[in-house]
Amino acid sequence: MALLVQKFGGTSVGTTERIEAVADKVCRFRNEGHDVVVVVSAMSGETNRLIGLASAIMEEPTPREMDVLVSTGEQVTIALLSMALQKRGCDARSYTGSQVRILTDSTHTKARIRQIDEQRMREDLDAGRVVVVAGFQGIDESGNITTLGRGGSDTTAVALAAALKADECQIYTDVDGVYTTDPRVVDSARRLDRITFEEMIEMASLGSKVLQIRSVEFAGKYNVPLRVLSSFQDGGGTLITFEDDEAMEQPVVSGIAFNRDEAKLTIAGVPDTPGSALSILKPISEANIEVDMIVQNVGADNRTDFTFTVHRNDFNRARDVLTKVSNDLGAREVSGDNKIAKVSIVGVGMRSHAGVATTMFEALSHEGINIQMISTSEIKISVVIDEKYLELAVRALHSAFDLDKAEGEA
Amino acid sequence: MALLVQKFGGTSVGTTERIEAVADKVCRFRNEGHDVVVVVSAMSGETNRLIGLASAIMEEPTPREMDVLVSTGEQVTIALLSMALQKRGCDARSYTGSQVRILTDSTHTKARIRQIDEQRMREDLDAGRVVVVAGFQGIDESGNITTLGRGGSDTTAVALAAALKADECQIYTDVDGVYTTDPRVVDSARRLDRITFEEMIEMASLGSKVLQIRSVEFAGKYNVPLRVLSSFQDGGGTLITFEDDEAMEQPVVSGIAFNRDEAKLTIAGVPDTPGSALSILKPISEANIEVDMIVQNVGADNRTDFTFTVHRNDFNRARDVLTKVSNDLGAREVSGDNKIAKVSIVGVGMRSHAGVATTMFEALSHEGINIQMISTSEIKISVVIDEKYLELAVRALHSAFDLDKAEGEA
């Protein structure tokens, strides 16, 4: 008898047939005696259809009206899913973000949740009803409709779970859990039964796009156990949870993440004076270019080489900015490479294990892969390598850290 | 500097191009210095699309969820129209029925408006904004989304005009006003500049489907001057207003209405005892068949003939009910005719003019048209005739009452 918040994304509710399949699944949980709150996205394609209508009228539609428009997408889904549940004899009631009173700030198209009034949902649950809530949307203090931006429905689900102190927040997607790495790259990639919030955040930010990082952070902050499962096949999925001191020893490395979308820029022979890093990065940031890894080495003659990575789409723009900076600073030269990739090992076990970096570098060296940049955090080591070695590197690391083997087997 | 409420139906906002045309029109009024509140329906086809989704899931969808679903249609239009207005430099803000707080009862799919909070609209108007409101929808006291049923957007417009004490409520449709009769039947049919509420209600209930009768009654009750105009061509339309004692003499007859969808049933030789009418009509009403005209004549031998009309679709069902009634009452026979039509002359001037009926019967007789039933009210005379004479009758009456001539010319 648990209280579950279940979230189904656009693909899972993409047709009326799929909505009926979701209703079957939800009813099964309800019939087992669980209390269920369901959060749904717009039917896949619907949000794009609505954006298309807006673009036909206005190049840059006003954010307030954009929110009024696109929030209809989830409203359609909550009504249809409630009908499908009722048809199965499963009493249900739908709520828009405004009705459940998901109070947000007024930042249209990317609002942040401030408060949720769980009273009404609680009454419905007590009356034996399934509560169906529109994801992605809320209302500000003046009653304006807001939306939460990318991944907003996941955030809604986590926020409802936190407000209701749910036993679990289940995110149904088109994959059946979080893997040790991308199964398309490594055949022997394995679904993890558990992963910690910190690891999940590092994995997500490094390009494992199972969950939006924002909802993971949110779940971690509010102690909401989060589970990723498949809408289309049965299985336990992956539970994202807190580090469990009493659990058997953590694996040193939980997963291998990677990102192909990076490019590297170097400004060499910069006079090494206080403030030189600022002089380089400020113009980049002012051009709205996000910087990922940063590495600086002191060289000879009081000059330094400064290297950083940006999204590959920003490569040309960043190089132009940097060339100007180089002239201003009297640096020697600007060089760049947009054929690089980033590979990272992630695991909370690293904290208590020495020699993890050595194992990593050894495995790469053994395959003849040159490391161009290194960056570390407490539970992650990232390296930049030539893009052409990406798959080879991921496979080598997956094997070097025994991720091919079932948990407990290593 | 008037305060106008303008309503545009589904055809008028059926595409983004048409929404832009509506925005042009609204901006023009705004630029002339008028305060404008716009009420819109769902884009034509959208409501049917949504109903189709619901039917794919459930044969008889629950009314509450149906309202959640179909109310998204108008919400899309208010956002798009607001964008189109903003693009033209015309500041605008959209409101759903729930946001403007159109409070209704809880009769889902055909709710009735109880109260409107005009404060927020007033603030926007004072700030120079056009207010764009979703028609057809409201919210009940518990915050559930409701819809107003057929013609609901017209009702929304009239209710807003009443709450705001607007100078005029303008209903934009695909016709350019109210005509003396259907121009497809009489070439010389003429657009009326004015018509009274009472006449309009008789015309509407007799099959002139320019406006939903409910919104006309509502406008009459709350003293809201109502104007019917074309979305697609310029012109003053028809003003529906109160009888003006000071105006020049009213025309005796304002228009000729007609209805082809009727059928006639007679039960003959009914023993003429108190309660016989009730014995006949109660079973009909219990079968959910609506009765229109009723005529009873006392015959010989304390027996009476009883005739009434029903919608043509109900003809067979009504005859079956009546046959059973006839046996129970010991009546002589049941007969019927579903090839009849009703033609009516409507005009407030009738009240002060004798001889109107004579003129009507003379005109029909002159064309050799037999009158099968007659029914009269204070401002209307209806006759039932053989369906095949319908067009001939309408033309004869249109001419007999000088409706071909311009106003004041008669």
Image (cartoon, coloured by chain):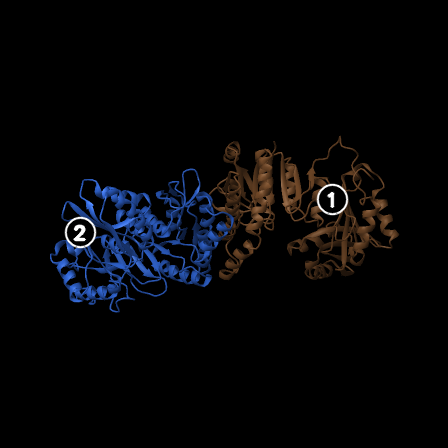
Chain colours: A blue, B brown
**Residue A59 place in picture, x, y as percent:** 47, 48
Query: Residue A113 occupies which quadrant of the picture?
Result: top left
Chain hosting mark 1: B
Q: How many marks?
A: 2
Measured from the top left, where is residue A114 in percent x and y?
Answer: 34, 42
Quadrant position of the C terminus of chain B in the picture: top right
Callout 1, which amino acid? Arg
Please give the residue where the numbered disc 2 appears in the rendered image: A378
Residue A314 vs residue A186, the one in the foreground: A314
Residue ranking furthest to the left: A354
Residue A218's label in the rendered image is none
Q: Is residue A189 above or below residue A222?
A: below
Per the model, the C-alpha gap separating discs 2 and 1 is 82 Å
Q: Which residue is mark 1?
A: B191
Q: Could you tell whether A64 is left or right of A336 in the image? A: right
Q: Amino acid at mark 2?
A: Glu
